[in-house]
Structures are given as C-alpha cells and as structure tokens.
Image (cartoon, rainbow, N blue to C red):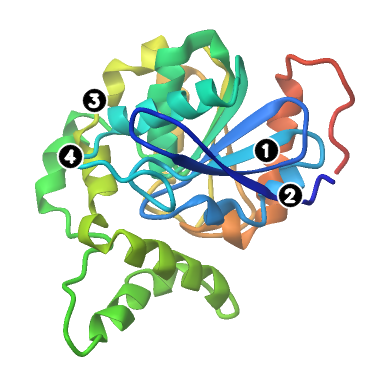
Amino acid sequence: MADTVRRGYAPSHFGQLHYAECGSGEPVLLLHQTPRSWTEYADVLPLVGRAHRAIAMDTVGFGASAKPEGPHSIERFADGVAALADALGLDAFHLVGHHTGGVVAVEVAARLGDRVSSLLLSATAFVDEAKRAAAPARPPVDHVDPRPDGSHLVEVWNRRRAFYRAGEEAALHRYVIDALTVLDRVEEGHEAVYRYRMEERLAHITAPVLAVCAPEDHYSLPALERFATALGCETAVLSGGHVPAPEQLPGEFADVVSAWVDRHRRWPGPTSSR
C-alpha cells in the first residue's frame, strides 16, 4: 500500500546506507537537513508515495547510515546519495533537498546531469565567497558541550525550540533524537555547507529547478532570488512554516513536490491526485 513505509539498507563503500520508502512508480529521492535523518520526511513520505516511489535516505554520517571517519563534506554526502541511487537501481530520479540536503542536491544534480529528472531546492542556502568568508564569525547552530548533570539535553532542545510552534513538540523531539545520535559531530554538516563552492557547480545542473522556502525561515528565504538569478529557475513561498517546514506543513510540502514531479515526469502514467 502507498501509505506503508518500508525501510532498508543499501551497500556502499562507506558501509550500509539506511533509507525509508513508500509507494511505487517514478522515484523521488528526498534529502534531509543536518543533523536530521529521514524522519524529517516521516509525514511527507506517505503523501508523495501516493503516486510516486518516495525515498528518504539518511545522509552518510547521520541517522542510521554508516558514519565514516574523517571530515564530512558536501562532496562526501553526494557520494553517499549517488551510491544509494546506484544500489537501488535508480537510473533516473527526481531530487528534493531541504536546507543542507538542498546543498547536497545541488552537488548531486551537477554530477549526475540527466539522471536527475527534476530538482527541488527547499530552504537551501546560496553559498558563495561572501557566505564562506562570514562563516568563521557564525555561532554554532546545534553544538552543545555534554555535562555530567545532563543539562545539555535541555540545551539541545532549546537550540531549535523557537523554530517550532506550540503543539509541534513531537517533531522537535525527533530533532533532539537525531542530534544526540551524532552529538560529537553535530555541527559538521553546517560546516560542510560553508566550505562548499556552490557557485562553481550551478552551471553543471541540467535538470529543471524549483526553489521554495517557508516565509518564517529568514535564514534561507533571501536565497530564492539568488537561485532564480543564477539558474533562471522558478520560486515559490509556502503558506507558513519555519526551518522544519516539511514537518510543519507535510501536506502542502508533499503537494508542492508531487506537482513539480508531475510536470517533469519521465514515465507514462496518471498524475497524482491531491
């Protein structure tokens, strides 16, 4: 059934890569922000899976995927995405990335060319020389120092509490679980973003691109105009939400994804019903 989430592991040179999938048909691969896992798409996956094969992976180094030693980089994360696509036999697929996942999606799309049928960048940072130069002064996003009394657990919660509305504590809890899973390296995904030379890779993207963002996500909202200028792509602003938009507006997020995929589908078949 479309609403049944199946979970599995695929081999790679990093080790096992964990993923969850739902539905069947044309594949849509969803990449999460850091330090999250596939659970960022837990409510989106069954909705996209109504008409497509929706797949959400754990990025290399995060969630239940292999955690190799050595520094993380956007290029390493992209290696993991390509390895999963190869292991699952995805000759062509639609690609969705949120925050860090969007930056990784840029690199994947630049590498794989026509294998990426379409690209949806959600709340994705536009990384250029100015952003890299400002990175050393940027305060840590998720880092906390473990303390014997456990008070750092509350600090992890409070790091992102302002992004969530009352009643969204279950989603915030999922973030805390993901952050604690990689607490010793929790900041490395953000650091990888700020080292990435994105502007050198954009010209290699051949897939049609849609850049979207939540209106309260002031970290990423300004990037929409920059992507539109650099790629000549379409942009859209969701009706609400903040940094965790896929969890706050799963229905709207899934509708945007499905409508974009339907416009650029390669396989014959009916479009999704929403």
The Cα atoms of the two marked residues, 1 and 3, are separated by: 29 Å
Mark 1 belongs to which amino acid?
Ala
Which is nearer the eye, 32 or 255? Answer: 32
Mark 3 belongs to which amino acid?
Arg
Q: Secondary structure at mark 4?
A: loop
Mark 2 belongs to which amino acid?
Pro
Q: Are marks 2 and 1 in contact (CB under 8 Å)?
A: yes
Q: Earlier in the sequence, mark 4 or mark 3?
A: 4
Residue tagged 1: 54
| Rendering quarter of residue 101 | top left
x, y percent for residue 213: 52, 45
Q: Secondary structure at mark 1?
A: strand
- Give me the disc on residue 46: 2
> Is residue 220 placed above or below 81 in the rendered structure?
below
Mark 4 belongs to which amino acid?
Pro
- Give me the disc on residue 71: 4
x, y percent for residue 146: 18, 75
Q: Earlier in the sequence, mark 4 or mark 1?
A: 1
The Cα atoms of the two marked residues, 2 and 4, are separated by: 34 Å
| Rendering quarter of residue 29 | top right
Q: Earlier in the sequence, mark 2 or mark 1?
A: 2
x, y percent for residue 57: 51, 41
The Cα atoms of the two marked residues, 3 and 2, are separated by: 34 Å
Residue tagged 3: 197
Left or right side of 125 for 146: left
